């Protein structure tokens, strides 16, 4: 039994140097890229949303791997848990059978493919062109960044010494933070205003308005006729 | 397949970001569904975010310090927040469009064409 | 544990880590699955008692405690149906999405000191975020079933969960503020000692906010009276109308798993985590580490403590479910937006002011005495608490220098 185990161990020894970081990076990167490409290739809008969820979730995993735990959790919470739920909500509100799969002409697809390929070539070229970016990262775990991040959002930088910025003072992000909060408030109100239920002036509403102050019967008939004609005229 | 220790560098992240970015651009170009276009925008923003985080990560930076430091993460945070805002507004517009036109096909939004 | 395997048995490190990870995953899976079995049985018994019935009495002895196992076997044997016109891939995928989200959140949940799958610096945030992903399974199930009832249930679920994440997040931030850390282990450590150190008894505002949290937690895991997504009186069974057999049971396991999870989170955030009402470990003198088994005993005690609190939370949820009538969807939204959110915001401000003006509590010095009695796992581990704990209003020396420079 022990010998068997030992034999198995020696056989597996070349794999002893597995780099978990690299392995998980590959895993998450494959999921993110594959799902992103599936978003483009799928026509069904609900499946697109699912692939988008996968892609963004895997991106959150990449953030965790890069040592930015806070951004990763934020991505999961706001992006995947909030924005995408909203998006799926919109998809379901508008999901009629003829709208679920809208196909694009093949010529457009080819054009988009050429455009994307060209863009991709340029981006990859620039990504690998700088030597400093190709240097492998450190193998040790870096200090958690959540606290410096929070302090920076409050306007105080505590990461100055670590990052080696002694020469120039670092400013915090209190003002951008406030601007973003006000912006979010504005968006909240604006979105609620845009998507609110419209009060349409239907004939029933006219009746209701008329019934508030009941005039004599003859007048009512003429008024109803008038309003109906106005409605028809408005329709034209 | 043997993966050597510490091979993941900033460039790896940049390439993943580039793939996400181009997928998003292609998505915006190809889709006729307004919500599909919105998803393309989300992908583009995420590709950019990945770059920000990669440049800001002291884990990925080699011997020297990270080129962006904390700024990269703060930028990523702001992008996430503003993307949420953008999605909310775009969704409201889409739903409004759907109410008025009974479709979400962006090619049909040509009322103002002369 | 991984170090132990590497050093004593001589396993290569990757094998040791894989083994440890497998053991941890197995344990968590067992907590969810075994917990679901026990809780389903408990729910049936409690429901029966509340409705003046007996509940299961025959399967497996006098109290019917094998009932949920029998149910499980029945579910396994059931035919797996898929409605005509359903989106096959999404239909099959949906239950696993739900279950995985519930499972992933357990990764960062500490059961006792050091008994945590992955100690994350942003643990609270991670748990809440991942728990929010469970809604995707429900939405997908609702859409893919190609049934009106399911779609209605899914839409309600989406609206409800997104709304309730706002007050939930606000409640969760309060213990984070008090502890000065988002690390769940640190938060629980700070509540060590006597009952009075628990954050629920920290000040009146936290006491109120605990109940707001509990309400929002019940709503966010879709339990009655907030179970609009499956409201059987209106929507047949809501999002899982078309499901049967094993896939349906996955939804149930996810539901019971997340019930347990939010209760455990409540225990960690407000009820002292694995610290009992009385610091037994210190009183028994296990803190000096004289006996070899003491650390394990202390950890076991902590696990039992946390499990007990979480189970109590789940039982209260069941009690609520069988006592209160279901709310209407607009009432659910009103509860969230008009009551829970403003109350949470007010209490948040209150806790902040309290922390600013009365950091030591109403009776000066009392809290310090209480804090002097510490549980065993805190002894000699002063460095364990990360230096990132910046109390509110206190700026560390380095940052003061930075501020000085910038001025």
Image (cartoon, coloured by chain):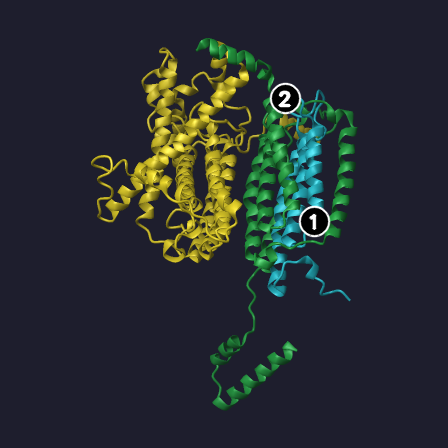
Instruction: Indicate the quadrant where residue A101 lies.
Output: bottom right
The chain identifier of the residue carrying mark 1 reads: B
Give the letter of the yellow chain: C
Q: Is residue C107 above or below residue C83?
A: above
Q: Colour of chain B?
A: cyan
**Chain in green colour:** A
Percent across and percent down for residue C330 are: 44, 57
**Residues at discs 2 and 1 both on one chain:** yes
Between the residue at mark 2 and the residue at mark 1, the CA separation in whole angstroms equals 37 Å
Badge number at residue B1: 2
For mark 1, give the secondary structure.
helix
Identify the disc placed on residue B28: 1
Which structural element holds mark 2? loop
| Residue closer to the observer: C240 or C215 | C240
**Quadrant containing the C terminus of chain A in the rendered view:** bottom right
Quarter holding the N terminus of chain A is top left
Disc 2 residue crowd, few under 14, some 14–19, many 20+, Cα 10 Å = few
Q: Chain of mark 2?
A: B
In the rendering, at what x and y percent does residue C392 appear?
A: 53, 33
Residue shown at the point (71%, 65%) measured from the top left: B111
Check whether the beta carbons of the residues at disc 2 and disc 1 lie within 8 A of each other: no
Is residue C274 something one can see in this rendering? yes
Residue A72 picture quarter: top right
> From this viewpoint, is residue C159 visible?
no
């Amino acid at each position: 039994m022990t010998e068997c185990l030992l034999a198995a161990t020696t056989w597996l020894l070349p794999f002893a140097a597995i780099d978990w970081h690299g392995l998980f990076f590959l895993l998450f990167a494959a999921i993110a890229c594959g799902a992103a490409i599936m978003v483009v290739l799928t026509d069904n809008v609900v499946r697109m949303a699912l692939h988008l969820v996968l892609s963004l979730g895997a991106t959150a995993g990449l953030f965790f791997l890069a040592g930015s735990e806070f951004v990763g959790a934020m991505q999961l919470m706001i992006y995947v848990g909030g924005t995408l739920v909203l998006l799926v909500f919109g998809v379901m509100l508008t999901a009629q059978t003829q709208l679920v799969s809208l196909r694009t002409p093949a010529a457009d697809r080819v054009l988009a493919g050429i455009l994307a390929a060209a863009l991709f070539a340029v981006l990859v070229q620039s990504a690998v062109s700088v030597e400093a970016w190709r240097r492998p990262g450190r193998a040790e775990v870096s200090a958690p960044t959540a606290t410096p991040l929070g302090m920076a959002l409050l306007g105080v930088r505590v990461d100055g010494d670590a990052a080696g910025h002694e020469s120039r003072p670092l400013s915090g992000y209190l003002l951008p933070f406030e601007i973003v909060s006000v912006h979010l408030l504005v968006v909240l109100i604006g979105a609620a205003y845009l998507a609110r239920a419209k009060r349409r002036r239907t004939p029933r509403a006219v009746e209701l308005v008329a019934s508030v102050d009941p005039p004599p019967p003859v007048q009512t008939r003429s008024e109803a006729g008038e309003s109906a004609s106005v409605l028809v005229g408005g329709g034209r | 397949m043997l993966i050597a220790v510490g091979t993941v560098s900033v460039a790896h992240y940049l390439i993943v970001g580039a793939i996400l970015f181009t997928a998003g651009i292609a998505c915006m170009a190809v889709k006729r569904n307004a919500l599909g276009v919105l998803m393309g925008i989300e992908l583009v923003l995420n590709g950019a975010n990945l770059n920000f985080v990669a440049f800001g990560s002291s884990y990925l930076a080699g011997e020297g310090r990270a080129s962006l430091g904390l700024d990269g993460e703060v930028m990523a945070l702001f992008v996430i927040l503003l993307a949420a805002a953008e999605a909310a507004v775009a969704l409201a517009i889409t739903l409004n469009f759907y109410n008025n036109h009974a479709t979400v096909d962006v090619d049909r939004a040509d009322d103002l064409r002369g | 544990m991984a170090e132990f395997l590497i050093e004593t048995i001589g396993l290569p490190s990757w094998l040791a880590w894989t083994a440890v990870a497998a053991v941890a995953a197995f344990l968590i899976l067992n907590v969810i699955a075994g917990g679901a079995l026990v809780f389903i049985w408990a729910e049936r018994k409690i429901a029966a008692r509340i409705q003046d019935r007996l509940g299961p009495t025959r399967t497996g002895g006098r109290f019917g405690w094998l009932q949920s196992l029998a149910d499980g076997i029945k579910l396994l044997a059931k035919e797996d149906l898929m409605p005509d016109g359903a989106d096959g891939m999404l239909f099959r995928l949906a239950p696993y999405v739900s279950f995985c989200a519930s499972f992933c959140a357990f990764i960062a949940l500490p059961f006792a000191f050091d008994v945590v799958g992955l100690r994350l610096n942003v643990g609270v945030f991670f748990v809440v975020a991942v728990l929010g992903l469970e809604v995707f399974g429900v939405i997908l199930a609702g859409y893919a079933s190609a049934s009106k009832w399911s779609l209605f249930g899914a839409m309600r679920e989406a609206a409800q969960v997104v709304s309730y994440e706002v007050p939930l997040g606000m409640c969760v931030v309060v213990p984070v503020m008090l502890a000065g850390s988002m690390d769940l282990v640190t938060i629980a450590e700070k509540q060590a000692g006597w009952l009075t150190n628990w954050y629920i008894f920290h000040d009146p505002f936290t006491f109120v906010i605990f109940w707001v949290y509990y309400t929002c937690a019940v709503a966010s895991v879709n339990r009655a009276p907030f179970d609009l997504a499956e409201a059987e009186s209106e929507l047949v069974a809501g999002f899982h109308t078309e499901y049967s057999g094993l896939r349906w049971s996955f939804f149930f396991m996810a539901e019971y798993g997340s019930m347990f999870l939010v209760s455990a989170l409540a225990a960690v955030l407000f009820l002292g985590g694995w610290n009992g009402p009385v610091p037994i470990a210190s009183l028994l003198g296990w803190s000096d580490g004289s006996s070899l088994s003491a650390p394990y005993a202390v950890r076991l005690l902590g696990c039992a403590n946390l499990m007990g609190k979480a189970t109590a939370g789940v039982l209260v949820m069941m009690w609520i479910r069988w006592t209160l009538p279901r709310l209407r969807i607009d009432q659910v939204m009103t509860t969230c937006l008009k009551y829970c959110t403003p109350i949470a915001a007010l209490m948040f401000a209150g806790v902040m002011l309290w922390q600013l003006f009365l950091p030591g509590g109403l009776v000066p010095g009392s809290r310090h005495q209480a804090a002097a009695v510490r549980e065993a796992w805190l002894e000699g581990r002063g460095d364990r608490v990360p230096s990132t704990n910046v109390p509110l209003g206190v700026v560390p020396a380095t940052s003061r220098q930075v501020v000085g420079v910038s001025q």
